[in-house]
Image (tube, rainbow, N blue to C red):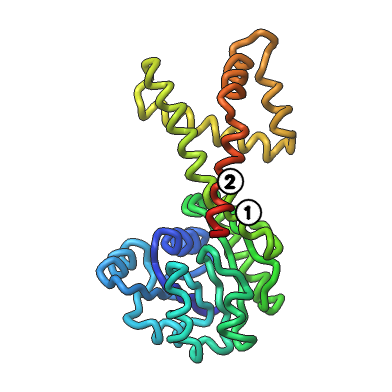
């Protein structure tokens, strides 16, 4: 691909662009962006290194690959404005709630489409990027895009009907993990540890536990059992979590997300 254009330059788009540059896979002069708030756009341009563009039309005419990263409620209006200029181009969407069929109904087969759902840890190269299996990319360009986005984290392909639950887990999940980190940091502070140290201990413990599961492939229950000695301290803490309904509450949080999507 010769050039990439971002429609919208919020936190996620910034993370993606910054990740591309840090990976060395894309030069800064290959990336352009348009956003309605010009002051923020130009400030982010100076900080990250992409080229700001003053109009939506100019952006689409300039870039070969368009990444739509605006708010979901803005997409229909944006597509209507640049539909003709998008013909023959690749359109990647990182907007929540929109899938391939939504774009196809507006753009037809004149635009090659791929929907991607990233999460915020992509900012540090540890993201989850869900690629919708239904797409209209040519195989060579899809391989190129998969390789490019791989610098932001792990990639998982999901059928359209699972993009919603996948997004609930990986997209909302960081906020849930943050709550758990904050709660355990509060406990550490309660017993005398300084808060910066508490956050350091908890975040590394969560990171290390996740990495251990990834590398070993062991069931989380097996890893949990390895820490729990008979009549020991850890099993008492596990018992308290079970009595508090941790598992049920985690499932309830996903139910809340999925039920909201149905409204």
Identify whether 37 is placed above or below 104.
above
- Residue 177 in the figure: left or right of residue 14: right
Count of numbered badges drawn on the protein:
2
* Mark 2, residue position: 254
- Residue 75 in the figure: left or right of residue 92: left
Image quadrant in which you'd find residue 250? top right
- Residue 225 in the figure: left or right of residue 52: right
Q: Position of residue 206 (x, y in %)?
A: 55, 33
Q: Which mark is residue 205?
A: none
User: Which is nearer the eye, 105 or 180?
Assistant: 105
| Dot 2 alpha-carbon crowd within 10 angstroms: few under 14, some 14 to 19, many 20 or more | some
Could you say whether the residue bearing mark 2 is in a helix, strand or loop? helix
Could you say whether the residue bearing mark 1 is in a helix, strand or loop? helix
Q: Residue furthest left?
A: 39
Give the position of the N terminus as an image quadrant: bottom right
Q: Position of residue 218 (x, y in %)?
A: 74, 34
Q: Which mark is residue 165?
A: 1
Identify whether 167 is placed above or below 8.
above
Distance, label 1 to label 2, CA atoms, is 8 Å
**Does the CB distance between marks 1 and 2 fall below 8 Å?**
yes
| Dot 1 alpha-carbon crowd within 10 angstroms: few under 14, some 14 to 19, many 20 or more | some
The residue at 42%/73% (across/down) is 74
Q: Position of residue 173 (x, y in %)?
A: 54, 46
The residue at 66%/77% (across/down) is 137
């Amino acid at each position: 691909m010769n050039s990439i254009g971002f429609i919208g330059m919020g936190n996620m788009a910034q993370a993606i662009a910054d990740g591309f540059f840090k990976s060395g896979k894309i030069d800064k002069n290959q990336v352009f962006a348009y956003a309605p708030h010009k002051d923020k756009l130009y400030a982010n341009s100076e900080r990250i290194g992409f080229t700001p563009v003053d109009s939506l039309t100019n952006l689409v005419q300039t870039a070969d690959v368009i990444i739509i990263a605006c708010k979901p409620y803005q997409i229909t209006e944006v597509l209507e404005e640049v539909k003709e200029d998008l013909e023959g181009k690749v359109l990647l969407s990182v907007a929540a709630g929109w899938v391939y069929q939504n774009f196809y109904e507006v753009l037809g087969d004149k635009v090659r489409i791929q929907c991607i759902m990233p999460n915020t840890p992509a900012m540090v190269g540890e993201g989850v990027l869900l690629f919708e299996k239904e797409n209209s990319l040519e195989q060579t360009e899809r391989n190129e895009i998969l390789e490019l986005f791989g610098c932001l984290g792990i990639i998982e392909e999901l059928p359209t009907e699972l993009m919603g639950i996948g997004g609930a887990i990986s997209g909302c999940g960081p906020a849930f993990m943050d709550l758990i980190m904050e709660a355990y940091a509060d406990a550490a502070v309660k017993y005398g540890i300084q808060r910066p140290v508490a956050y350091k201990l908890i975040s590394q413990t969560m990171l290390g536990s996740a990495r251990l599961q990834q590398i070993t492939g062991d069931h989380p229950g097996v890893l949990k059992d390895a820490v729990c000695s008979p009549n020991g301290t850890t099993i008492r803490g596990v018992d308290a979590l079970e009595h508090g309904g941790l598992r049920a509450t985690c499932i309830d949080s996903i139910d809340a997300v999925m039920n909201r999507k149905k409204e």
